[in-house]
Amino acid sequence: MKVTRIELQPGVWLTAVQTKKFKSSVLGAQFLTPLTAEKASLNALAPMVLRRGTAAHPDMESLSAALDELYGGSLEPMVRKKGETQCVGFVGSFLDDVYTLNKEQVLEPAAALLAELIGAPYTQDGAFCPDYTGQEKANLADRIKAQVNDKRQYAQIRVVAEMCAGESFGVDKLGSLEAVEAITPQSLWAGYQALLKEARVELYYCGSADAQRVQAAFGPLLAVLPEGERAGLVRPAKGKAPKQAKRVEEALDVTQGKLAMGFRTNCDAWDQNYPALTLVNAIYGGTTTSKLFMNVREKLSLCYYASSGLMKYKDVMLVSSGVEFDKVGQAEAEILSQLYKCQTGDFSDDELEWARRSVVSTLRTTLDTQARLEDYWLGQSAAGLTDGPDDMAARVEAVTRAQVVEAAQDLTLDTVYFLKGRE
């Protein structure tokens, strides 16, 4: 697997992963821009409306027919958050040229169709189509409203919003219902023109073609990008936990409480000790052999589930748990007790090695899945980092026990969010 990174023009980068491991190839184009409450919904809506039609293929039926001609390929809108950067655009999957019936080229027409989606959208009266805009606004609003349906995920969204209020990281990648409601075809068009001109662009390919051919295939897309000064990389500022943790309670119609706890880590993907932090997370709550799983859930039965997870591009770790309403105090105390054990080195050599094997295995299996590989490289590109999964795995292999304890000692409780039932 060969990874080539090229700046095609100022602020426009290509990551080309050459491999014959997969039968499909992946194409992507993402616009990277600072995440803000004012523009999050506007940016999130743009690829959804773009996907409805182009000047040459003005509806989804004709677009689908064009994709069918490319061996049933796909091009889907994507909205993601990497640290305090919002990433919006398209990811497509197509049959790799090696496997076409008569060795036809799929890469070039697929890249041309991607360029068409981005550079020649279907418009009416100099703006986006009002019908498409209205329908996709309704869909985006439904996605935002639906976040509350998954209570576990909702609790995590809420603890981040409370913990990082006033920080860009606290903004949801989809924005807000109020912002969606205010969008018009004209404001969406103006916002998209600004995105086209000002956002950093990350192009991606994974398949059997070499980087030179991929670069040429993206020529039509480069031709539709306006010249301008594009946004630089954003490294989020590190937060500082309050002296006393912030506490937030919310009541909804739930039969099981959701306890979410946000910790400041004083460490993110840019830091040298980040590999050690990944092991802290794995020992603490990131695996089925972790302290939270084995003790808080299995041994003490204080939670239906209990796990921890790192926000790689922000100095945040979240603990997520499902608890009985009357056990929330006990559960919180035990969750903190297990963290103290990590901070004092109270874990066995076996626990450390189980954690190491889990983290390394997760990194290396990234290479086996095209979707995870694309997402990994998008995150690295958004952060300006060049380590591949194998490089990161090697760094994790080298972490010592002392480094794990040191990284754990930087964890500080910031915010506790509890979702309880209505009285």
Image: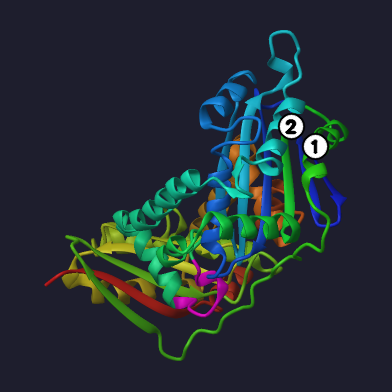
Say which quarter of the image contains residue 35. Answer: bottom right
Q: Which three-letter amino acid code belongs to the residue tagged 2?
A: Ala
Spot the residue most to the bottom: 243
Q: Quadrant of the N terminus?
A: top right
Q: Nearer the viewer, residue 291 or 158?
A: 158
Say which quarter of the image contains residue 269. Answer: bottom right
Element type at mark 2: helix
Q: Is residue 216 magenta?
A: no
Name the residue carrying label 1.
220
Q: Position of residue 291 (x, y in %)?
A: 40, 62
Q: What are the residue bounds of the magenta stretch?
A: 163-171
Q: Does residue 87 lie above or below 51 as drawn?
A: below
Name the residue carrying label 2.
112
**Residue at x 55%, y 84% (from the top left corner):** 240
Q: Position of residue 150 (x, y in %)?
A: 32, 54
**Residue at x 44%, y 49% (from the top left corner):** 134
Element type at mark 1: helix
Instruction: Give the spatial CA distance, label 1 vs label 2.
Output: 6 Å
Spot the residue most to the front: 125
**Res. 104 visible in picture:** yes
